[in-house]
Image (cartoon, rainbow, N blue to C red):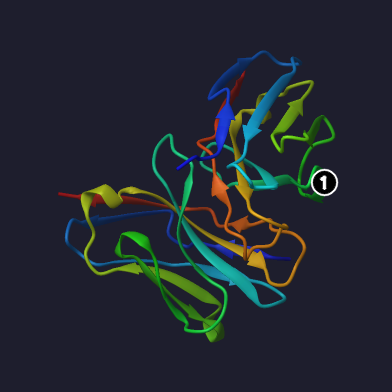
Amino acid sequence: AQSVTQPDIHITVSEGASLELRCNYSYGATPYLFWYVQSPGQGLQLLLKYFSGDTLVQGIKGFEAEFKRSQSSFNLRKPSVHWSDAAEYFCAVGRVSSNTGKLIFGQGTTLQVKP
Amino acid sequence: AAGVIQSPRHLIKEKRETATLKCYPIPRHDTVYWYQQGPGQDPQFLISFYEKMQSDKGSIPDRFSAQQFSDYHSELNMSSLELGDSALYFCASSLAAPNPNNEQFFGPGTRLTVL
């Protein structure tokens, strides 16, 4: 069965520090991989996505993620966190070459930023 | 830029009542997805429509039904509401056929509380 695991439920970092949010997936086929951010009371906003090609993808707000097939991982990184980055982050997977666009989400990681 | 509109934003119902959630996709988007996010949970795919036809179905209870209308807006009808239906219901839309390659744009969600 397809699944996405985000091992860290809650992470706290200091403003200006680097950030890495972990995501592991279990999938029987080549996946499409996504990172979404959800601020309180808001909908999900796409940060970045990986379909193919370069395994290091750049997204909005200074985020990047690296796809590592051997580790079934798609970790999200940011070199310097800003207070406005405090939010919940979801990793998601979709199925390549399918006629369904449904996404399977991980449990989410709540990011808290200390001043 | 126009975004996905969901109404109402908040809804409070009693057990065994019915509820109707509405979703208005971004203009020219012809695919709509519904997700349910329980408290502290990840979004779970419910159902999707493409060109007014159901394209995929997830873990949607039989008490729920949905449809997409000729103007591409969609409604999620929920009957015999249970306490466990309390959740944030997201609608997302995308352009063209359901495929993870087509970015899903999420609405702000409807928060349903069942008392």
The residue that appears at 60% across and 45% down in the rendered structure is B92
Disc 1 secondary structure class: strand
Looking at numbered disc 1 in the image, what kind of residue is underneath it? Gln
Q: Chain of mark 1?
A: B
Q: Position of residue A67 (x, y in %)?
A: 49, 78
The residue that appears at 47% across and 82% down in the rendered structure is A55
Q: Position of residue B96 (x, y in %)?
A: 69, 56
The residue that appears at 59% across and 46% down in the rendered structure is B43
The residue that appears at 71% across and 77% down in the rendered structure is A29
In the rendered structure, the answer to whether residue B87 lies left or right of residue A79 reads right
Q: Position of residue B65 (x, y in %)?
A: 81, 33
User: Quadrant of residue A77 in the image?
Assistant: bottom left
Q: Is residue A14 above or below residue A59?
A: above
Q: Residue furthest bottom?
A: A70
Q: Is residue A54 above or below residue A34?
A: below
| Relative depth, front residue between A79 and B92 | B92
Q: Is residue B83 above or below residue A38?
A: above
